[in-house]
């Protein structure tokens, strides 16, 4: 996944998810899911989902000056589903899963995701917010299987800038000088002045 | 005259549809032995809504009993063993809810006894140690900042002054509303 095709937000989400999957606590997980698209069946428990739940983009600086620039607040959510008939044990499991995900933040490189060349690494600036809930079964608590779900999210912050891609560079200006005014073509020869400009195309050379 | 539902409705139906069950009264009669019974077993599809609208597929499973057949009714926490019967599987369940329909029938909502998944998590949890427990250093902050803040005084509370517009008006200054500066898209 590279930024020429995918957004930094999804790259960050997938980067975090790939690392969370490697935590020893989740080695018994039967299904890892990147989205809630597919139904979770009993054989998929324990289940770990990591979703891009929401993204808010605020202007980075004045919104009406220069190119569009954004501060992204990306809500990366985690769903850990377990089953246990004992309520206390279920909650302890959910809490342990939560703490393991939080513990990911102690990694030295938790905020940095290397990219293949020529792309620079993708980096998170910070975590603006987080939340968690423990959910036990459905709303009426009358489902058969003693499911318990950890729902937690971390809102990570990064920035983007959409600089214009100039395809019609102003490389040179040609000025034909005819002097003095009113110009008499029989008195003086006109001459041409060429201004070569150091444009983006020149800088790319 | 009221209809005797248990006699004329439930008993004929239970004679056809009920299957044998064993009640293990661990909550209603702790220490008492398990006893046999019969009930109409029913299970239907129900979904548990997970994070971001995820669907966790599940069943809603119930067992109907005739109340008069049980001197002590099952309550939440009792176990119900429903053995394989007439080519239909059952299982071991825990009573989650018991509802009386007012006609002599008790409906038990059942929760299946399952193997815990995962079995154990915490012993393999934090392999790099827990993060540092953060404490706010209130003493240091008050010791350093508070005296300084008194020395320079509190910053002015900045609030919009509605009266100032009257003063400006009296001075004859232009108090018209600023013009709305719409971007000139055509000119650009």
Image (tube, rainbow, N blue to C red):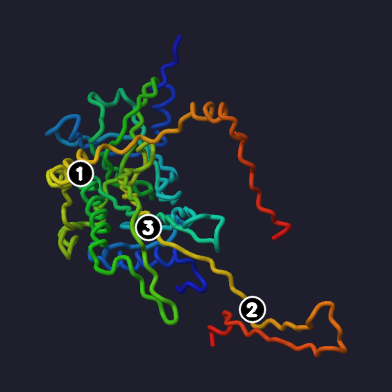
Q: Is residue A3 above or below residue B36?
A: below
The number of discs equals 3
Callout 3: helix, strand or loop?
Answer: strand
Quarter location, residue A40: bottom left
Chain containing mark 3 = A
Callout 2: helix, strand or loop?
Answer: loop
- Which label sits in the foreground, 3 or 2? 2
Q: Label 2 vs label 1: CA separation?
A: 67 Å
Residue A113 appears left or right of B143: right
Name the N-terminal-most of marks 2 and 1: 1
Residue A205 appears left or right of B14: right
Q: Which residue lies under the disc numbered 1?
A: A88
Q: Label 3 vs label 2: CA separation?
A: 37 Å
Q: Which residue lies under the disc numbered 2?
A: A169
Q: Which residue lies under the disc numbered 3?
A: A156
Which quarter of the rendering shows the C terminus of chain A?
Answer: bottom right
Q: Label 3 vs label 1: CA separation?
A: 31 Å
Name the N-terminal-most of marks 3 and 2: 3
Along the line of sight, the residue nearer the viewer: A111 or B2: A111
Q: Position of residue A102 (x, y in %)?
A: 26, 57
Quarter location, residue A29: bottom left
- Residue at (32%, 54%) from the top-left corner? A80
Along the line of sight, the residue nearer the viewer: B36 or A160: A160
Callout 1: helix, strand or loop?
Answer: helix
């Amino acid at each position: 996944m590279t930024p020429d095709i995918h957004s930094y937000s999804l790259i960050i989400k997938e980067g975090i998810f790939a690392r969370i999957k490697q935590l020893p606590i989740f080695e018994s997980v039967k299904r890892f899911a990147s989205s809630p698209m597919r139904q979770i069946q009993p054989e998929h428990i324990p289940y770990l989902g990591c979703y891009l739940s929401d993204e808010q983009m605020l202007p980075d600086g004045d919104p009406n000056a220069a190119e569009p620039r954004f501060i992204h607040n990306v809500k990366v959510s985690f769903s850990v589903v377990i089953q246990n008939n004992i309520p206390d044990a279920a909650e302890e499991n959910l809490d342990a899963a939560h703490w393991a995900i939080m513990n990911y933040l102690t990694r030295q490189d938790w905020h940095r995701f290397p990219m293949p060349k020529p792309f620079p690494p993708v980096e998170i600036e910070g975590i603006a917010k987080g939340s968690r809930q423990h959910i036990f079964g459905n709303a009426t608590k009358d489902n058969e299987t003693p499911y318990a779900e950890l729902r937690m999210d971390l809102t990570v912050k990064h920035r983007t800038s959409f600089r214009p891609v100039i395809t019609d560079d102003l490389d040179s200006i040609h000025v034909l000088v005819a002097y003095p005014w009113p110009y008499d073509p029989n008195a003086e020869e006109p001459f041409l002045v060429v201004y070569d400009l150091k444009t983006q195309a020149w800088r790319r050379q | 005259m009221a209809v005797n539902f248990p006699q004329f409705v439930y008993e004929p139906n239970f004679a056809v549809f009920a299957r044998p069950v064993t009640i293990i009264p661990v909550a209603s009669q702790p220490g008492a032995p398990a006893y046999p019974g019969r009930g109409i077993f029913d299970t239907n599809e129900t979904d548990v809504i997970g994070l971001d609208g995820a669907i966790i597929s599940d069943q809603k499973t119930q067992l109907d009993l005739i109340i008069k057949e049980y001197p002590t009714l099952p309550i939440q926490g009792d176990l119900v063993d429903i053995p394989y019967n007439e080519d239909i599987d059952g299982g071991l369940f825990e009573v989650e809810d018991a509802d009386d329909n007012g006609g002599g029938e008790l409906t038990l909502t059942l929760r299946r006894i399952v193997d815990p998944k995962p079995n154990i998590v915490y012993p393999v949890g934090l392999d790099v140690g827990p993060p540092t427990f953060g404490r706010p250093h209130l003493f240091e902050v008050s010791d350093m900042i508070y005296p300084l803040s008194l020395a320079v005084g509190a910053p002015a509370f900045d609030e919009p002054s509605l009266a100032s517009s009257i003063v400006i008006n009296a001075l004859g200054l232009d108090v018209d509303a600023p013009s709305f500066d719409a971007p000139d898209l055509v000119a650009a």
